[in-house]
Amino acid sequence: DQGRKFQANAEGDSDELVDPPKVEDKIGAVPHGLSTDSDVVKRESESISKRSLRSNAEKFEFQAEVSRLMDIIINSLYSNKDIFLRELISNASDALDKIRFLSLTDKDVLGEGDNTKLDIQIKLDKEKKILSIRDRGIGMTKEDLIKNLGTIAKSGTSAFVEKMQTSGDLNLIGQFGVGFYSVYLVADYVEVISKNNDDKQYVWESKADGAFAISEDTWNEPLGRGTEIRLHLKEEAGEYLQESKLKELVKRYSEFINFPIYIWASKEVDVEVPADEDDSSDEEDSSESSSKEESEDEDADKSEDEEKKPKTKTVKETTYEWELLNDVKAIWLRNPKEVTEEEYTKFYHSLAKDFSDEKPLAWSHFTAEGDVEFKAVLFVPPKAPQDLYESYYNANKSNLKLYVRRVFISDEFNELLPKYLNFLLGLVDSDTLPLNVSREMLQQHSSLKTIKKKLIRKALDMIRRIADEDPDESTDKEKKDTSSDNNEKKGQYSKFWNEFGKSIKLGIIEDATNRNRLAKLLRFESTKSEGKLTSLDQYISRMKAGQKDIFYITGTSKEQLENSPFLERLKKKNFEVIFFTDPVDEYLMQYLMDYEDKKFQNVSKEGLKLGKDSKDKELKESFKDLTKWWKTALSKDNVDDVKISNRLDNTPCVVVTSKFGWSANMERIMQSQTLSDASKQAYMRGKRVLEVNPRHPIIKELRERVVKNPEDEGVKHTAQLMYQTALFESGFLLDDPKDFASRIYDSVKTSLDISPEATVEEEDDTEVEAESDSKPEADAVHDGDVDDAKDEL
Ligand SMILES: Nc1ncnc2c1ncn2[C@@H]1O[C@H](COP(=O)(O)OP(=O)(O)OP(=O)(O)O)[C@@H](O)[C@H]1O
């Protein structure tokens, strides 16, 4: 054994696993391509000192936001400094993915010999306090170094800076795409040595003081290809010079990196050496970091027993070897039965770059077989990202990684999932897709459609399972009581719904094929849900005998809707009505026409049927005089008809809209949209129908008066006021609030027995005449004396 040590098991998948780097027998030998202590010495000679950048280098200033970010990091009191290693390893892994992807279409990019080994190496120099992380990834050209590490701020840069200034957690740095800079949590001087196939080897260096420098690297060991990051650790970051600490960190944070990660690890071994007196003279030739100790006692024992043999002694010698730290067998290739919950959770954290304690809400790990074969792992995150719906229709964002035969291809493949499922995280690894074609070609591959279809099904199944396993979701009372063992799943679906419910709704709108499956996942509150969420299936199970439609109402809040006049008789007759209070619900209900053969009926729209009422015809007939009269009176108000209502109990009248136009709520939503166009608004506006309550005393009285004298101005006035009030109560915005207000004041006058001719008292303005040129307020209240009215009220 040449000292190769595979700490984690690397069974199977030998095509996956790249040969570990060679192991040196003795200290001081140069591991190929990795710098050594003597190089460090050389480098030091190139650098004027650790405190100043190389003088002959080209200097650059960091872009302002990047500079602020670095200030925040280097001065941070954040205690979890460990995160830098995970960020560097993640970058190394990305760089390896990139070169591996390129090698699919051009084998030559990998070069030969050690350059073909796609691995990550960690090395320590305790004396100089340098920690280096090296990869054989794609590397950076000079231009890449300048752009990627300092001059081009990404969108995440300022977002992260902002977050840090409020209550941000530095742990999130990877999610903002600025992970590299976390090196300044532990280092005050950093060198990035990089070699890309298209350029020479360069060194980037910075002390996070606003500037960085770049020089062509003529003194370090040639890297062949890839990047080495050298961290000159801060005084207080000494713990990162301990192998054990680094091993622990790699295990904890980088378990799912799909490239081997090695550490240059020390090992004490017993070595037999001739016990000659004079051999002690050349003993200390070996490198400074080795140590030899004579173990005199042992030696003494042995010498007694083996007197005849040539005199030898055993010495402890420190040797170094590359020790593999991770298991590169991808989790998705394993049998789901053998992967623990904890492993899935950790895998989720590494995918999400979210290292909180929160578990994903659900996951699905499966293999698809048949024409198109693939393995996939999908996760429902515990929380929706803040910007999930911000640019829903414009953002090309997917959180799914695509692999083809274990090779990472892309995480920008929008063809794998529809937009509404963009909140899912995970990966797909397909054996069917071709490896040696460009991303563009792959994007058009016919198998993608099949993969997408299956992924959607599996995703929806996974979401349904959250509901199935949630005891809160069960309608069966007994089941609810006995499933105390399922406490962990309790309330999970409403948690899911609160985070991602909008996505399900958008799915119903966008995905006609899966509309019914998605509708099953829909949750809402209703007149009978007692403050909890309920489903369409539960609604149907509670439907009254003879009830044909599913009733719902839309508005801005449940509290407002609960008191809506549209619900009066429905509640009295014990019909359940769904409350839809999200603006997206209006759109949703334009697409969700029926469910399980039941039609949806907006109770604020025409066409509400509550079963047959034998008195209907009679009532209609007896109110004909009033309804006809009123229809004529309202013709200038765009009212289509006046009808007898079947939905009212205490309210005299309401305004309903036609079935296919906008509801009052939708009208309001559209009016509040800055870019909505007025002509469309007029066109889509539902036709209005005034419905009157034939049992209401005001309506009955109005009928009497209309029959007596259809020309009575007082009745006309009252009828108009009734209509405006009904509009208002039915959720419409009044076109002419001024007219409404003055009618109210007129009524107030009447009820206070004030003469209709009474006018507003003239203000005695002789003293203020000089400075006041504005009109008296009188016309704002027409001709009533508001102050007096208020006093008496
Ligand atoms: N080891 C590396 N090899 C090649 N390029 C690298 C390496 N490390 C960093 N880079 C380049 O520098 C850029 C900035 O890295 P940084 O870590 O700040 O952001 P990121 O990798 O894009 O996002 P994240 O922080 O999420 O990993 C990377 O996008 C990459 O182009």
Image (spheres, helix red, strand yellow):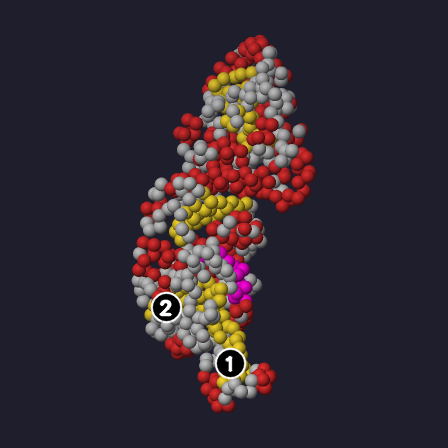
Q: Which residues are magenta?
A: 245-258
Label placed on residue 272: 1
Among the 4 quarters of the image, the one containing residue 133: bottom left
**Residue occupying image coordinates x 63% and y 42%:** 490
Among the 4 quarters of the image, the one containing residue 644: top right
Helix, strand or loop status at disc 1: strand
Residue 778, given in percent of the width and then of the height, sits at 54, 30
Side of 381 where 405 appears, left or right: left
**Residue occupying image coordinates x 54% and y 53%:** 343
Q: CA distance from mark 2 to mark 1?
A: 36 Å
Single out the residue that lies furthest toward the front: 308
**Residue occupying image coordinates x 44% and y 77%:** 28
Question: Relative to 289, does residue 683 appear above or below in the rendering?
Answer: above
Which residue is tagged 2? 223
Residue 652, given in percent of the width and then of the height, sits at 60, 20
Side of 417 where 616 appears, left or right: right
What amino acid is at disc 1? Glu
Total number of numbered discs in the rendering: 2
Query: Between disc 2 and disc 1, whose residue precedes?
Result: 2
Helix, strand or loop status at disc 2: loop
In this rendering, the label closer to the viewer, 2 or 1: 1
Looking at the picture, tell me which residue is in the foreground, 625 or 398.
398
